[in-house]
Image: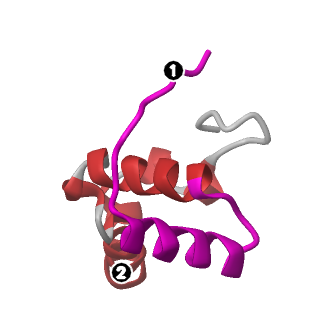
């Protein structure tokens, strides 16, 4: 279920929102909804995927040695430790 939220913006901002939405092939509502999700997203998640990829690239072997039962090559097709 979704809820309706009303905001007031001046004419200039409304024109910019319409222009941006049209350029993206979207709607003003979709544009504002996306912006609202960005506003409430946890900032600690910024760049988390890249940090994880860097860790695996640099420390993956050491991690596998420290936790051999959890190493990807030690798992069966169901994902359980072999």
Q: Residue at x 32, y 71 (%)?
A: 47
Q: Position of residue 44 (x, y in %)?
A: 20, 56
* x then y, percent, for residue 4: 51, 25
Q: Tell me the tag on residue 16.
A: none
SS class of the residue under badge 2? helix
Kindly identify which numbered label has been placed on residue 54: 2
Contact (Cβ within 8 Å) of mark 2 with mark 1: no
Assess disc 2: are there few (<14), some (14-19) or many (≥20) residues with their C-alpha within 10 Å of its C-alpha: few
Quarter of the image with the N terminus is: top right
Horizontal placement of 49 versus 59: left or right? Answer: right
Point out the stretch of residues depicted in magenta.
Answer: 1-28
Q: Is residue 7 magenta?
A: yes
Is residue 18 highlighted in magenta? yes
Element marked by disc 1: loop
Which residue position is annotated with label 1?
3
* Residue depicted at x 50% and y 47%: 33
Quadrant assignment, res 64: bottom left
Label 2 or label 1, whichever comes before in sequence order: 1
């Amino acid at each position: 279920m979704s809820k309706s939220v009303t905001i007031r913006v001046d004419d200039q901002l409304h024109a910019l929102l319409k222009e941006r939405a049209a350029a993206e092939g979207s709607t003003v509502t979709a544009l504002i909804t996306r912006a609202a999700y960005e506003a409430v997203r946890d900032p600690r998640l910024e760049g988390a995927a890249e940090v994880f990829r860097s860790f695996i690239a640099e420390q993956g072997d050491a991690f596998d040695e420290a936790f051999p039962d959890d190493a990807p090559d030690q798992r069966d097709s169901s994902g359980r430790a072999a």
